[in-house]
Amino acid sequence: ADSNSEVTEMQMMILGLHEFEAADATCTCTFLDGPHAAGKFDAHLEASGRSWHVAGQPVEVGLRRIVEHCEREGPYDGAFGFSQGTCMLALLSDLGEWRRCGGS
């Protein structure tokens, strides 16, 4: 795995949640990386991790990254986050915060 998003993708594949196909619906997951470089958190990873927020930087940097992606590539029916990603999604679940970060 080369990044946090690839690690999450592998974990979801193990759980059978990466793609789901039913007779009347298809679910495909999109995996994002945070905007900030982070240290390597696992010796088995080829690359360092990514972070949604780092000390000294506004949290809006990460929030806007998510909103911009969703506005450009969406619409999406749902969102899943792990660790900092969960925090970002919790903040963006407030419509006022979503709009403040550029969402429609």
Image (tube, rainbow, N blue to C red):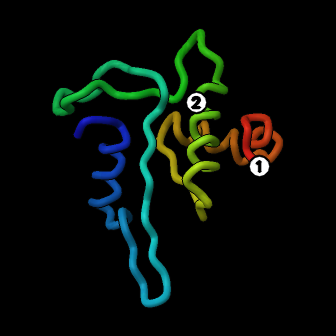
**On the picture, is 6 further left or further right than 80?**
left
Question: Residue 88 is drawn in which quadrant?
Answer: top right
Relative to 8, residue 41 above or below = above
- Measured as percent of width and height from the top left, residue 29 is found at 43, 59
Tell me the kind of residue under disc 1: Ser
**On the picture, is 81 further left or further right than 45?**
right
Q: Residue furthest bottom?
A: 23
- Measured as percent of width and height from the top left, residue 56 is found at 59, 9
* SS class, disc 2: helix
- Measured as percent of width and height from the top left, residue 19 is found at 37, 68
Foreground mark, 2 or 1, reads: 1
Question: Residue 26 is drawn in which quadrant?
Answer: bottom left
Towards the viewer: 20 or 99 = 99
Q: Which residue is mark 1?
A: 104
Count of labels in the image: 2
Q: Residue at x 27, y 60 (%)?
A: 14
Tell me the kind of residue under disc 2: Gly
Q: Residue at x 64, y 34 (%)?
A: 64
Question: Residue 86 is drawn in which quadrant?
Answer: top right
Cα–Cα span, label 2 and label 1: 17 Å
First in sequence: mark 2 or mark 1? 2
Which mark, residue 62? 2
**Within 10 Å of the Cα at label 1, are there few (<14), some (14-19), or many (20+) other Cα atoms?**
few
Towards the viewer: 82 or 31 = 31
* SS class, disc 1: loop
Q: Residue at x 35, y 37 (%)?
A: 4
